[in-house]
Image: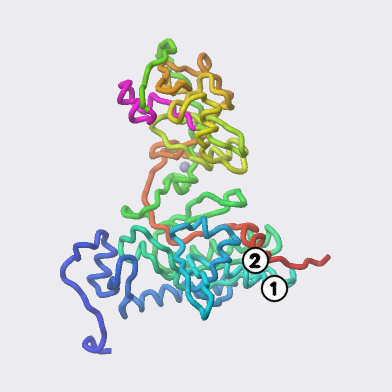
């Protein structure tokens, strides 16, 4: 092939709208060109690279026993209504009405293919003898990306390999999960990537049932907690910490409990400014609805609550922040003034809470806070839990070394979905009986 007969438009200058090296290099080497925000043309050299990567993925999927097929990107919206994902995807799901003769059809462009593949398998496989089966495709996906950026890293249209397994038991699920995990490791190793498998939040069937594969990179948008000595790694939502329950500092003099006026100050920032204390001296009291019952969750003012940890600590099926009415019922105050002193619901606390001497909290009264709040004297705790997002320098849950927070780019994800899709789309089979 002659250079003059191909199409490799290289660039000398670094394009001003390309923020990160991968985007700059791909433009300069003539691999890609942008059509519009979030949509790129792969030029001949770029496409050649995509095809090589695809081939590696294809070979490893085949080796893991998955079989290739190809499903439509165009999908009827009612499949997404049946699984509740029309609502769950919200604005991300690209969908539209088309005129077909005298009727209108409502269609979506597939963001992934769980619905389509479950509908397919449910219709055409019906005996336990035909299971397990694992199918995959390499297909274009569509997701309305509100802020497309970083070249081909975050786009509204992208090529993805997605594989789906169907089986009759948790054992079959675990076997294929393991095969896929290993296949992903082989793919990334063959591509020469330095990658980390990290524990991710597990979704509907619980356990440590989800892994993301991440490439550590400064401009990655995912945050990973990583322990180098023991190689524990988890995404920030999932990461546990090895913290123990703190004890109140021995040199702290217990101040008297005092109610102070804090007119209109409902946030940690407003109250700390008004009372001249740091957010770390404050206790955030978050009212959650856990399986329909109110519970107060205490988190240090400068920390971020982790809903999945709260759900597990309570042994609840579902938790969400309480609505205004429930907050008023248990605190007797409008939103923003909750505190543990005299609250009318069970209270659970993060490990760091007992370590705050003379804390500042809401007073369960409009426009008022307490200062000098101390556990034992002013409110009772039966125990403490790991209820917040991990941070850099927290102790590792496995070995106690200090954790690091690194950024990463997600390159793969394996899930155990359980029966979420097979139940909602009636994909059932006949067993021996
Ligand atoms: Zn460790």
Q: Give the camera-side residue of 153 and 360.
A: 360
Q: Earlier in the sequence, mark 1 or mark 2?
A: 1
Measured from the top left, where is residue 252 in percent x and y? 40, 14
> Which residue sits at x=38%, y=74%?
50
Mark 1 Cα shell of 10 Å, populated few (<14), some (14-19), many (≥20): some
> Which residue sits at x=47%, y=29%?
285
* On screen, residue 248 above or below 432: above
> Which residue sits at x=26%, y=83%?
7
Q: Are marks 1 and 2 in contact (CB under 8 Å)?
A: yes
Judged by depth in the image, the label closer to the viewer, 1 or 2, is 1
Query: In what element is the residue under mark 2?
Result: strand
* On screen, residue 394 above or below 147: above
Q: Quadrant of the C terminus?
A: bottom right
Measured from the top left, where is residue 427 in percent x and y? 68, 66
Magenta span: 266-286
Please identify the quarter of the rendering in which residue 425 is found.
bottom right
Colouring: rainbow
Q: Quadrant of the N terminus?
A: bottom left
Please identify the quarter of the rendering in which residue 294 is found.
top right
Measured from the top left, where is residue 167 in percent x and y? 67, 65
Residue carrying label 1:
125
Question: Residue 185 — which label?
Answer: none
Measured from the top left, where is residue 326 in percent x and y? 55, 32
Locate residue 407 relative to residue 139 in the image: left or right. left
Q: Is 272 part of what is drawn in magenta? A: yes
Residue carrying label 2:
166
Locate residue 282 relative to residue 112 in the image: left or right. left
Q: Is 62 part of what is drawn in magenta? A: no
Number of numbered tags placed on the structure image: 2
Q: Give the camera-side residue of 331 and 246.
A: 331
Mark 2 Cα shell of 10 Å, populated few (<14), some (14-19), many (≥20): many
Query: In what element is the residue under mark 1?
Result: loop
């Amino acid at each position: 092939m002659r250079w003059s007969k191909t199409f490799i438009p290289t660039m000398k200058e670094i394009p001003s709208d390309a923020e990160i090296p991968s985007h700059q290099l791909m433009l300069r080497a003539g691999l890609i060109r942008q059509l519009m925000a979030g949509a790129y043309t792969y030029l001949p050299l770029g496409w050649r690279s995509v095809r090589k990567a695809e081939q590696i993925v294809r070979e490893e999927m085949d080796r893991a026993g998955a079989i290739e097929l190809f499903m439509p990107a165009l999908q009827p919206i009612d499949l997404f209504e049946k699984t509740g994902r029309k609502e769950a995807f919200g604005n991300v799901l690209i969908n539209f009405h088309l005129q077909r003769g005298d009727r209108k059809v409502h269609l979506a462009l597939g963001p992934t293919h769980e619905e389509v593949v479950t509908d397919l398998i449910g219709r055409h496989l019906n005996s336990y003898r035909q299971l397990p089966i694992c199918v995959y495709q390499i297909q274009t996906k569509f997701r309305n990306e509100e802020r497309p950026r970083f070249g081909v890293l975050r786009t509204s249209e992208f090529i993805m390999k997605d594989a789906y397994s169907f089986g009759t038991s948790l054992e079959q699920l675990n076997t294929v999960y393991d095969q896929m995990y290993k296949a992903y490791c082989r793919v990334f190793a063959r591509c020469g990537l330095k990658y980390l498998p990290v524990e991710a939040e597990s979704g509907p069937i619980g356990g440590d049932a989800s892994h993301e594969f991440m490439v550590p990179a400064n401009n990655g948008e995912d945050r990973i907690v990583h322990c180098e000595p023991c190689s524990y790694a988890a995404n920030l939502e999932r990461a546990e910490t090895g913290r123990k329950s703190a004890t109140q500092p021995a040199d702290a003099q217990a101040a008297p409990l005092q109610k102070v006026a804090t007119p209109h100050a409902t946030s940690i920032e407003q109250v700390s400014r008004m009372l001249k204390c740091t957010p770390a001296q404050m206790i955030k009291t978050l009212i959650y609805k856990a399986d329909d019952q109110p519970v107060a969750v205490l988190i240090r003012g400068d920390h971020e609550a982790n809903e999945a940890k709260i759900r597990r600590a309570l042994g609840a099926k579902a938790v969400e922040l309480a609505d205004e009415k429930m907050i008023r019922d248990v605190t007797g105050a409008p939103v923003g003034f909750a505190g543990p002193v005299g609250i009318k619901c069970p209270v659970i606390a993060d490990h760091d809470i007992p370590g705050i001497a003379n804390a500042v909290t809401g007073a369960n009264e409009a426009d008022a806070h307490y200062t000098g709040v101390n556990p034992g004297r002013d409110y009772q705790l039966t125990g403490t839990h790991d209820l917040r997002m991990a941070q850099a320098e927290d102790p590792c849950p496995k070995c106690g070394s200090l954790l690091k927070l690194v950024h990463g780019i997600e390159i793969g994800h394996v899930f155990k979905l359980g029966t979420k899709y097979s139940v909602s789309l009636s994909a059932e089979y006949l067993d021996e009986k």
